[in-house]
Image: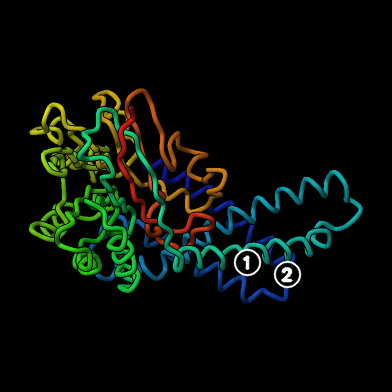
Amino acid sequence: MSWVFFLIVAAFALFNFVTIRSLLAFHPRWRSLIIVTAVAGNLVWPLLPFILSARTNPYIRLVRATLGPIWFSWLIVVFVYSAFVAIMSIIWIVAARRRRFVDFSRRSSIAWLAVLVLLALIGVYHALVPLRVERVTVAIRNLDPQLVGYRVALLSDLHVGLFTRPSRLTRTAETVRAERPAIVAIAGDFIDDDPFFVPKLLKGLSSIPSDIPIVAALGNHEMYGNPEEVIRGMAGSRVELLVNRGKEVGRGSAKLWVAGLSDFAAAAGGRRARPGLAPDLDKAMAGSAPNAPTILLAHQPDAFTLARRRGIALTIAGHTHGGQFGIRAIRWSLAGVFLPFDMGLYRREDSQLYITTGAGYWLVPFRLGMSPEVVILTLTPSN
């Protein structure tokens, strides 16, 4: 792990060098602004080991919420701007070597920076203002007639943190309430690492009527903080946390089994490993009726592999955020570049997976083309 961290730091050190040197050469009049921005964007690096080792510390809570977004935004800028410099270098070598590279690139640099600022503003708006409702019909084999039209509200990746607006949580809860689902499922990452924010989460969801059960599964960000404290904080609350256990729900005499799977981050190696909280599908399925359809609630889409082996009808997950950048109309997201399943509905054999792109954002309030969503899944028979 230390070698991976070293390589990441080395790569971004190179991107920093290329970006800062190029900006100073192209835009010398902006020298003070460039230096101040570069310093602010790199302040977190010396604090990073401490941040990673003490995620529930109140001082780290403040540093993470204030300097973290600046740091991560700067990482994106240096990566994108370094790519711009590389492209301009190739064009200059091929077609314009008679001109000085600085003179050749200056106007293009201004245009590129203007585009970045425009996209950033749009992305911030998409992250903080809209809240879309995605309605999806899911066909389930041998679905009991009493369960036809059964509605599941799926939330994920709220990432409740220091700057999460209570009004935003209330709006999310009111949106769910207006849809009148039979059950609400939260697929992990409901807080941003620190169990300190559990009460804020619970208060924000309080307007969902008490006759609508709310269940949740742990995500990797709950694991990164103090999952045991999260579990204690949610015990007996409005939100029933399913940690490798299930819950029977349904309508009339017809029953569904909701199996809550713990997160795969608990099974990862290193000092953050929590073997006692590692995913255990057998435990999550214990007590389920043989003929009851199962909905597997998990944070990471990797759970679909386990679900397919068991022939589970439907897995619901989040985690990907759709990369917080994409084009929904053609079902493309940045996350899909790296993951086999990134958003929407998938079917493999007799099992299905639905991935929501999430109702919040991680660290930086930026979602371009992937505005937050509440998903309403309506069950229907497949034959």
Residue 77, above or below 301: below
**Residue at 44% in and 62% down:** 364
**Residue at 34% in and 50% down:** 376
Asked whether residue 14 is in view, the answer is: yes
- Residue 379 locus on image (x, y percent): 30, 40
Q: Quadrant of residue 47?
A: bottom left
Residue identifier under label 2: 27
Query: Left of 95 or right of it: where is 31?
Result: left
**Image quarter of the N terminus:** top left
Element assignment for label 1: helix
Q: Closer to the camera, 360 or 376?
A: 376
Q: Quadrant of residue 122?
A: bottom right
Residue identifier under label 1: 118
Q: Closer to the camera, 145 or 29?
A: 145
Element assignment for label 2: loop
Across the whole image, how many numbered discs are drawn on residues? Answer: 2
- Image depth: mark 1 or mark 2 in front: 1
Asked whether residue 197 is in view, the answer is: no
Q: Amino acid at mark 2?
A: His
Give the mark nearer the N terminus: 1 vs 2.
2
Query: Left of 299 or right of it: where is 344?
Result: right
State how far apart marks 1 and 2 are (Cα).
Answer: 19 Å
